[in-house]
Image (tube, rainbow, N blue to C red):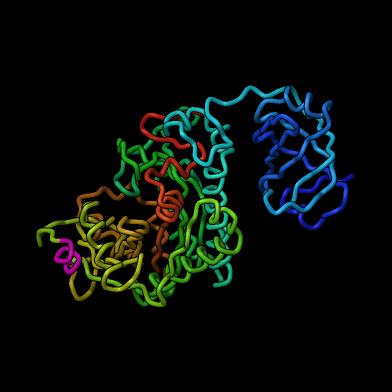
């Protein structure tokens, strides 16, 4: 008899079936016992009345892996409206050692550090696994949206020879006796690949050795990177980002409906045109000094409230960041050279995406490096490619974990990360 998942039971009423999963909960009453079995698709209720089967169930602690064969019976009070009757229950391994928290409760009561210490067990909880299902669906939507627009997926090195891309702290390592570093971003490589495919994207880990100990930062996270050629300016990049976000949310709705229901979530709408404000105007809206070079988290929150109030949007573009706060490869605004053709996208009052138009002329790179007093040699292999002809181009990067945290309302990005790596955590 072939195993079926709990979600398929409604199609087999009156039939004998086989399911398998983990003992989620046991309710041992006087005349009957209820065994709740959890599998990848959800929960199944098993009704035990036979004394011998009941005695066996009593010896199977929560999280023990079992196989159940029984008859599917309709019951409106059971999960999905069906349950298994007259079962046989067979353990597929030894009795499990229960984790240090109850996975059958509606919410995990353990502290976040305890959950992270015991992540292999904590992630089994429906609310924790639901967030990861949403994450997987979002990545599928990211890929599908870009594939449909002629982008090619690439895979770039995560070990590099120099720590040059963003100025952030880096993780150093030994590469056969030579110094090397974990990549902070695929930025340089995705620009170079525009010269091959015109439109490229990547899903991969990035590493930032910044000593941030906040609810929004990780030392390793998943970056969804995009770069496209033959743009007029940063607004073409913003248009692709809007379509990408809409595709991601559509795929979450299509693939992760059960996870959304588990978390009680309603997905936000992506406006047909996401509202945008220039950095100088954003400072005024946020009540920040006019000479402020960047937006602080409090400013971002104020802007998020303004976007929701004035435009009914959870999303807001802030354009024209000062060149002094942007990487050297950022294209300046021709009409306001002290400001950039760069942008951030705020999602519910937090920076989610950074992007913009890049320089594409070799001479501009030489001038930009000289203006910042940067040596040419560490960038030689990157800058040299621009001698061979590169189109006007731009791109963006989305932090996956931060996106899912904002989407689910998680207070801490670690709540939606399977095995987070941060200032303090390198295990499990």
Q: Position of residue 184 (x, y in %)?
A: 39, 45
Residue 110 visible in image: yes
Residue furthest front as drawn: 30
Measuring 67% from the left and 45% from the top, which residue is drawn there? Answer: 43
Measuring 35% from the left and 45% from the top, which residue is drawn there? Answer: 216
Task: Tell me the magenta residue range.
Answer: 280-286
Q: Is residue 154 left or right of residue 78?
A: left
- Please determine whether, in this image, residue 138 is positioned above or below residue 26: below
Q: Position of residue 35 (x, y in %)?
A: 71, 36
Location of the N terminus by quadrant is top right
Please tell me whether the stretch drawn in magenta is mainly helix, strand or loop.
helix
Q: Is residue 208 left or right of residue 203?
A: left
Residue 162 visible in image: no
Q: Position of residue 410 (x, y in %)?
A: 41, 47
Determine if the magenta segment contains residue 270.
Answer: no
Measuring 34% from the left and 74% from the top, which residue is drawn there? Answer: 233
Determine if the magenta segment contains residue 282.
Answer: yes
């Amino acid at each position: 008899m072939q195993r079926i998942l709990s979600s398929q039971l409604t199609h087999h009423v009156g039939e004998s079936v086989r399911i398998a999963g983990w003992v989620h909960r046991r309710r041992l009453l006087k005349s009957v016992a209820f065994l709740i079995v959890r599998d990848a698709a959800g929960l199944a209720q098993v009704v035990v009345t036979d004394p011998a089967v009941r005695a066996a169930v009593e010896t199977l602690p929560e999280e023990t892996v079992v196989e159940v064969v029984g008859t599917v019976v309709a019951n409106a009070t059971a999960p999905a409206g069906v349950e298994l009757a007259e079962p046989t229950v067979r353990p597929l391994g030894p009795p499990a050692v229960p984790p240090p928290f109850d996975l059958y409760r509606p919410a995990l009561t353990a502290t976040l550090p305890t959950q992270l210490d015991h992540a292999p067990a904590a992630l089994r909880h429906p609310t924790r696994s639901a967030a990861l299902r949403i994450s997987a669906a979002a990545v599928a939507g990211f890929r599908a949206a870009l594939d449909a627009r002629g982008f090619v997926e690439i895979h770039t090195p995560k070990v590099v020879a120099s720590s040059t891309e963003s100025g952030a702290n880096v993780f150093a390592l030994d590469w056969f006796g030579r110094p090397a570093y974990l990549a902070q971003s695929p930025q340089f490589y995705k620009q170079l690949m525009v010269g091959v495919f015109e439109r490229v994207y990547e899903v991969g880990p990035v590493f930032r050795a910044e000593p941030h100990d906040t609810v929004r930062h990780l030392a390793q996270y998943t970056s969804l990177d995009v770069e496209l050629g033959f743009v007029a300016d940063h607004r073409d990049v913003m248009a692709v980002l809007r379509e990408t976000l809409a595709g991601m949310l559509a795929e979450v709705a299509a693939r992760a409906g059960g996870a959304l229901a588990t978390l009680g979530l309603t997905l936000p709408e992506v406006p047909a045109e996401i509202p945008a404000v220039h950095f100088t105007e954003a400072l005024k809206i946020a009540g920040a000094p006019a000479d402020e070079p960047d937006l602080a988290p409090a400013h971002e929150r104020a802007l998020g409230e303004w976007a929701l109030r004035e435009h009914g949007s959870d999303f807001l573009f802030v354009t024209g960041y000062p060149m002094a706060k942007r990487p050297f490869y950022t294209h300046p605004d021709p009409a306001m050279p002290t400001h950039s053709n760069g942008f951030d996208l705020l999602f519910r009052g937090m920076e989610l995406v950074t992007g913009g138009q890049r320089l594409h002329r070799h001479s501009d790179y030489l001038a930009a490096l000289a203006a910042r007093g940067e040596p040419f040699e560490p960038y030689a292999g990157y800058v040299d490619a621009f001698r061979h002809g590169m189109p006007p181009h731009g791109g963006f990067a989305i932090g996956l974990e931060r996106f899912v945290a904002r989407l689910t309302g998680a207070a801490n990005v670690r709540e939606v990360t399977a095995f987070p790596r941060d200032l303090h955590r390198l295990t499990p």
